[in-house]
Every structure is written in structure tokens, then in C-alpha cells.
Amino acid sequence: MRLAEAHPRREVCGLVVRRGTGEVEAIEIPNAVAAAQAGVAFEMDAGEQLKVVRQLDEEGGVVLALFHSHVDAPAEPSPRDVTDVFSGGDPLWPGAEHLIVAVRRGRSVEVRRYRAVGGALRPIVEGEAN
Ligand SMILES: [Zn+2]
């Protein structure tokens, strides 16, 4: 993903949305964690995220997926990635997929898809019914 390759030293994050018009778009949300942590963690800027979600609500769009990149690490969820997608045991983004993009030496080498179920991020297997 180009967004992830543009910042190969820090984690990039954002939302994949379907606009009210039906158009699918990846929107980068600023990573709000301190610079020293940005190579290993992310937290979407809450204000920016809210703006996007409000806009979608207005136009009848939906969040299809949340994405973030891993810098020189596999496209596997970190323990923090897992805890961050649940609130009181329930998925924060019901129905949305979680995409992790592995970036190595400035190139995105792999994208893996996960679904938040039962306190875990489970890999989505192509062709499997949800
Ligand atoms: Zn992560």
C-alpha cells in the first residue's frame, strides 16, 4: 500500500471506507502516538477519525476496514493491536476488518486481513464464510 510505503519508519494507520457514492477509499488518519513509539505502535488521532466517521454517517457510507502498517515486522497483530480493538470484550468496530501491512525496507511486502472475534484477531481465510 502506497500510504504505508510513504512513511517507512513509522506505523501508518487509517480507515478503508465505502463512500455514500459507493466508491471505496483508503483514508490515512494521523498516528497520534509519540514519535519515539511510532515505529512500533499506532493510535488513530481521535478527532480526525471522528470527522471521517461523521462524514460517512451523513453520506450513508460505512467503514469497511481499519488498517495500519508494521515497520520491519510481520503482518501479525501485536498484543496491543488485539487489546485495542475490543472494549469491555466487544469489538469496537463490529463487522469491520483489520488489515495489517508489513513494510520492509520501505516496501509493503504483505497485507493480512483479520476479524475481531472473541477477544482475538483471527486471520480471515479467503473463501471462508464469515
Ligand atoms: Zn500493529
Image (cartoon, grey):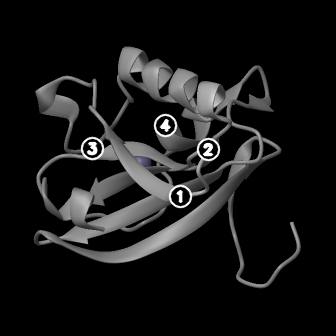
Above or below residue 105? Residue 66 is above
The answer to whether 37 appears left or right of 57 in the picture is: left
* Type of amino acid at the residue the image marks with label 3: Val
Few, some or many residues within 10 Å of mark 2 (<14, 14–19, 20+): some
Q: Where is the C terminus found, in terms of image quarters? A: bottom right
- Distance between the Cα atoms at labels 3 and 1? 31 Å
Identity of the residue drawn at 83% across and 44% down: 118
Kindly report which numbered mark, 3 or 1, lies closer to the viewer in this rendering.
1
- Where is 65 relative to 100, above or below? above
Q: Which mark is residue 20?
A: 2
Q: Which mark is residue 80?
A: 4
In whole angstroms, how far apart are the C-alphas of marks 2 and 1?
Answer: 7 Å
| View extreme (front): residue | 21
Around disc 4, counting alpha carbons within 10 Å, would you say few (fewer than 14), some (14 to 19), or many (20 or more)?
few
* Amino acid at pointer 2: Gly
Q: Classify residue 110 by image quadrant.
A: bottom left
Pointer 3 or 1: first along the chain:
1
